[in-house]
Image (cartoon, rainbow, N blue to C red):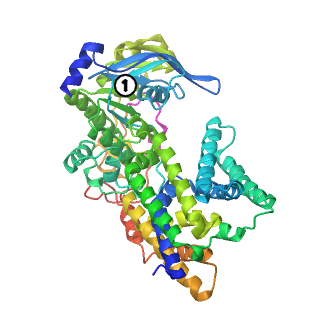
Amino acid sequence: MLDDFFTRALLAGVGVALTAGPLGCFVVWRRMAYFGDTMAHSALLGVALSLFFGINLLVTVFGVAVAVSLLLLMLQRRQSLSADALLGILSHSALAIGLVLVAFMTWVRIDLIAFLFGDILAVTPGDIGLIWGGGAVVLTALAFLWRPLIASTVSEDVAEAEGMKPARARLFFMLLMALVIAIAMKIVGIMLITSLLIIPAATARRFSSSPEVMAVLASLIGAFAVIGGLFGSLHYDTPSGPSIVVAALLLFVLSLFPALGKNTAEKAGNQGVR
Amino acid sequence: MLMTDRALGAQSENRLVSLANAGIRRDGRWLVRGVDFSIRRGEVVTLIGPNGAGKSTTAKLAIGVLRPDEGAVDRMQGLRIGYVPQKLAIDWTMPLSVRRLMRLTGPLPDIELAAALKATGIPHLVDAEVRHLSGGEFQRALLARAIARKPDLMVLDEPVQGVDFAGESALYELIREIRNSTGCGILMISHDLHMVMAGTDTVICLNGHVCCRGTPEVVSQSADYLKLFGGHSRSLAVYSHHHDHTHLPDGRVMHGDGSITDHCHPDDGHHHDAHDHHHDHSHDHHQHGHVGHDHAHHAPTADGRSDRA
């Protein structure tokens, strides 16, 4: 079964989507969309370093993403610029440095497009093992961190006062983000990773009654988007990464129609409560 | 629990937390400095002071959210804190019911969860989404959450903000009861001395530093307090006049008989002596309602809310 490139792509994509769902919820709740983008863009720098030093790609991408997020935390603590401006600087300069470095290395030929927009149809059985193994690690860690993370998302101060150690939770969360980006890069590409984090989570929001439900739904919706996108790309002969994102977007747009959600009833019912 | 109590009693007279000359500086400016106080089991300490006096900062120092740049803060080992912050902004994209909020930082059996919500007067909102709560309801939920944790120390930063007048004194009464029944220490922040007067052991008046301290009676008479709060003996005014209706934060009016309407009208049967207010301080918002409106009231619904849907 693993011989078929399409089956491999499906397995890899669904694995990434299942992992990205709960993490993406936190990205949405904590308003870290731009932060995720910054980490993802820095992945290209990781790619360049991997080629330059001949180290495993996963290691350098993970390392650079962690380094960039730590740098960002440090800069934010100095409070000289708004987080928004800092992210803008880091995000695009990481991408630009990566592109420049790759261009310097005239002795290597890399398929830049594959890194930027993903090459899901070229995944190997080894990649699939990595995705599912890494995904299991990420989801297990997230399960352990769940209460501190939720608590510090609601209020850092309350979490700190009541012994939830929000700083530690935040650090682990960033490590998990870096890991997911390293794993997902090959599937949807550097430019589109955040969409796989955010769009399924945003779609799940209207159908969720609790953070836990939203996390699970985001995983499932992401998996649907991957399956739909891949079949679409096969059928219409479109690039697979962008097709997955378009499929996710379609699901999101569908979720906006009031008849599908329970939200219309909920809204009317709650007006009295306010 | 008994062990720790005994050990603690031996070593530090039940001190839950103590600040010694604590200060915190941001951008070269001292937010608070030279703060000295401690809270013991069963003691209620109230911080009062004008805006920007450093009340919330001091509370955050006490519970370890902020670290002092000067001086020291000591907390009892394993101190269990229940915290109601002054501000809490939950991103609306997070689906959070009151039930889930109650279990934010620890598991909680259903029975205790329900009991805490009942105590703060919102048992009916257990499945409501937090973002749909009104300001006062949200404060009640936060207070219920802090209570349900059975903390050694409750830190309440303006716990009754947005709560209606009648609810306010009920909640202060509840806080007092909890102190009496559980023996926890309470650090409370208020800018309203008269509201917390009866239930507080020690009042600390802050304005960047400790201005004065003592029992509520002593502080309310002190020159520093009168200087900070204008010396109009406002607290006396509050005790001497009587409202027959309360203006809720959302603009509606709760009458003495418990009903709620959208406006206050002098002759709609909710007022017993509408033109006989003996206010001795100006209350601008009372004046609008006494000019005769000719439109009808919405009928209050069975649960005391007017139907606005």
Residue B47, percent from left and from top: 42, 24
> Left of B115 or right of it: where is B203?
right
Quarter of the figure with the N terminus of chain A = bottom left
Residue A200 in view in this figure: no
Instruction: Choose between B52 and A231: the one closer to the eye.
Output: A231
Quarter of the figure with the C terminus of chain A = bottom left
Give me the chain letter of mark 1. Answer: B
Instruction: Choose between B196 and A245: the one closer to the eye.
Output: A245
**What residue span does the magenta drawing correspond to?**
B278-289
Q: How many marks?
A: 1
Q: Is residue A246 above or below residue B15?
A: below
Q: Which amino acid, mark 1?
A: His
Residue at 71% x, 68% y is A112
In magenta segment, residue B246? no
Q: Which residue is mark 1?
A: B194
Residue A88, percent from left and from top: 69, 52
Residue at 63% x, 51% y is A64
Disc 1 residue crowd, few under 14, some 14–19, many 20+, Cα 10 Å: some
Residue at 64% x, 27% y is B27
State the SS at label 1: helix
Q: Quadrant of residue A166?
A: top left
Q: Residue furthest bottom?
A: A235
Q: Is residue A256 above or below residue A54?
A: below
